Image (cartoon, rainbow, N blue to C red):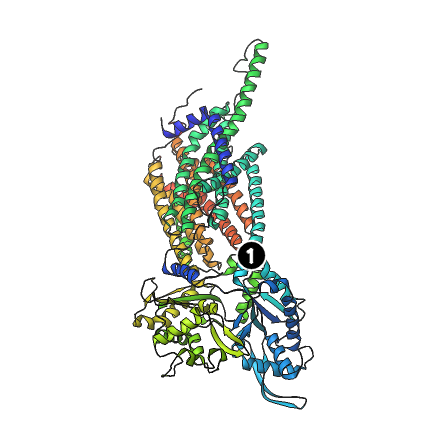
Amino acid sequence: MSFYDSMADGLSKHAAVFVVVVLLVTGMMFMVFGTMEQSYEASSDPAGPAFEARVIIGDEFPATAHQIPFIIEARGDNVLSKEVLIEVYANEEVYKSSEIYETYHYVGYDTDLDQPSYGVYTIADGVQDVLVGSFDTTLDQASEDMVKVALHFFVQGSPGIKGTFSKDNSSEVQDLTIGPMEFEDVKVWRTKAFVNSVLLDYEKVNDEMPEVLDQEATNLEVLSMLSGDEESYEAYGIALDLNTEINEEAQTSVMLVFIAVIAILIIVYVSLRSGAETLLVGLLLLFLLFWIFGAVRLLDLGSSQFINLLLPIAIIALGVDYALHSLHRYHEERRTEERPRKAFRKSIRMVGPALFIAMVTTAIAFFSNISSELEAVMQFGIAAGLAIIFAFLLLGLALPAIRMLFQDRKFLKAKDEEGAKEEAEGGPKDEKTAKPRNKKDASGEPARVWKALAKLGTKPILVIIIVVLITIPLGYRGMQIEGKMPVEDFINSESDFVVGLETMNKYFNLGESGIVLFQADYTDPEMLDTLDTFYENLLDNTEALPTLGVPTITWFVRNITRNDFVFTVYDNKTLRAYLGLTDDDDNGLPDTPAQVERLYEFIIEEDQGVPIYQIDDRIVSHDRLIVEYFFNWNKGAGLDKTVLYISIPRSGDASKVSEAREELEEDLEFLQGMGFTYNEIIEDEYYVITDVGTYNPFTREEQFSALTDSMARSVIISIVLCLVVMILLFRSLKFGIASIIPMILVVAWLYGIMEITGNYLNSVTVTIAAISVGVGVDYAIHVTHRFREEHAKDGDYEAAMTRTLSSTGNALAFSAGSTFIGFLIIGFSPMTMFSKFGFLTALMIAMAFIAAVVVLPAFLALTVRKGPGDQVLVTETTTPETTE
């Protein structure tokens, strides 16, 4: 007796026990799901120095301020007009009278404005201060010309402020007369927008609002106050509410998933024509989700978009396929078997091998992701592989078993009643008068489309030529597909979040921030000078720019060395004299390491910061924390570390990020001649290109590269392993190869069409290849297995393929159709990540179905052209029927 015979006989005899075990396990998994949580976020970070550097930066460079960046865009053509500045200033005053400002405002020093900062200071504040100090008036009282002159003086006195103007800024030199005063060569500035930030105290915000969503709510409240009525301008936040936006869109997307499941069940109902069976399918799909997420928690797998979002959707699609094939075959056998239990046993014997082989190969396809170096992808492979096994047990076996038990109970009850009736009427009826069971073929009269496809399969060379002509150009285009990771891929492109980023890209060359981490002895003046050399090299860089307003430790050292202000609190001396610094070569740096070390002691150890000037007894200075934000002095115990911030303007395009990295490597190459090691965390001098923060162009590039490499590797591994398994289980090389071809074609077609239609690879779409392998294998196995069974009956290819498509093809059509509709609905999600995944997966499902019922029959025709086919694993003729 074969394994499949044993499985069929065991299930038919002990179906009730099997179902009870399923219910007990489901109860246990439900309890686990309800009481245990995923305790951590699975990492999508590959191993590498860029990620090690991020940890170092997080540990050694503390943040000083919680930043709320925003853009003010004029409704007219000049954001520097009196009308706009008055409204901006008035809304700032509203913010400054708020509880948020009173509680959390940050006190520091603005290096752009060269003055103290008290949480927010815009161009409107600067113009107001000049008007009060020079004209004894205010913005709302001043004339237009006064505002122009005040703006001229403000920009002239704070040259860094010009960097906050949009890139369309311009100035016109004019001579202006205000009353008796004449002003010559006044630069009258015009610009469409400016960028600024509200700063909150970092420690207070994190201590009192540890939840990210609470911090983002505060960000939006501050932006709302600065926006006001927006009569003359519009205000846009920059990356203020990523998690809030994702949560809101995810809620809508989850609702779409429920709608998709309902749509799938409606099509299941049309296929099965049974409300009871449709409810059973829905219930078992719910059980399947409990099993999956219960197992995820028992195995302590982390939370990730792959497990939490993609896996349930993918597994519902495959679960429906198991359900339809198992129930359709059960229905088919019920037409020829009077007793439900016998029909169930026979259906499991006939379709069981196909379900089992599909389960093994699909699980292998997903388990192949265990080879990934990314924790999130590896854990997805484990969870998805287990989910396929669970789907086989629940939807492939338990579902028809439950249906059979209900029907068998009714059958036996009816038999008992019939026996009692016959006994009362004087004995059983004559066999000739008894109504016979319908012995017609289960599929009935084949539909024309199945006959046509079977007929087409008799011309395999023609089909294969057409397929090759289609696949070659699509495969070539698929090889050209690019990877991109724009923020629009993750959230709604019409959301305020994305609109803010688009506005930033429109007006400013800011982009996302990259960081270079350096380790060296920065008490050595020569090492300090290398930071300036790097910044000079950056001036010729087209894809990476110095970040606005972010100084370096070299800048601070020069600020002290060249500061000629005499401080009474420092013995009426300049800082240079007070600290004993010399600068014989006049390069702005102390001449010896000992002098630099003394300067660091003053800034950090003595907590003096970087004094700039003195007003009465008050010292205006850069706070020590500002310095420590990008410089970590090891006090001679080891080499020092510092970070330099750079902007990547076009960081949404992966190719531009690669170009930026290449140009940065060229800008930094001179350090290697000075003994620095590149891209390796060591004890000696090194530098590493990395990033931190909300958006991370360089590490995201490495994540994406690792993800695509991982998926490509897993697809290859899964194809090879699936081929081996199918050859072994089908006991046929040619049937194994024929069944693997649709899977390969679907991947080639999918990425070719994606490239042609302007789609690209991202962290979500790249995973569709892994799902397409599972779906492609599943569909192909059902067709191949049923064809072998039918072909063994009479050796007639066309008749066998007609019967195959009329039965298995029908089940596949409803399975693929329901899944296609479900994913199509998900494609209308406002969350771009979900939307692309939905549409592209629906496309993949359609192509997998076409490959299974159009292309695969042609290859199967070639496999049986010279004979009646290979040995059949399980058929009605090779396995004798057992009796109750």
158 or 314: nearer the viewer: 158
The structure residue drawn at horizontal position 38% and vertical position 83%, both measured from the top left corner, is 586
The number of callouts visible is: 1
Amino acid bearing label 1 = Met
Does residue 725 appear left or right of residue 315 in this picture? left
Q: Position of residue 539 (x, y in %)?
A: 43, 76
Vertical placement of 198 versus 412: above or below?
below
Q: Position of residue 817 (x, y in %)?
A: 52, 43
558 or 257: nearer the viewer: 558
303 or 119: nearer the viewer: 119
Q: Position of residue 370 (x, y in %)?
A: 38, 47
Q: Position of residue 136 (x, y in %)?
A: 66, 82
Vertical placement of 349 versus 544: above or below?
above
The residue that disc 1 covers is: 209
Vertical placement of 113 versus 463: above or below?
below
Residue 544 visible: no
Neighbour tally class for label 1: few under 14, some 14-19, many 20 plus, Cα within 10 Å: some
The structure residue drawn at horizontal position 47% and vertical position 53%, both measured from the top left corner, is 764
386 or 849: nearer the viewer: 386
The image quarter in which residue 600 lies: bottom left
Does residue 524 appear left or right of residue 569 in this picture? left
Look at the image and tell me in which quarter the C terminus lies. top left
The single residue placed furthest to the right in the displayed view is: 141
- SS under mark 1: loop
The structure residue drawn at horizontal position 52% and vertical position 46%, both measured from the top left corner, is 820
Residue 849 visible: yes
Look at the image and tell me in which quarter the N terminus lies. top left
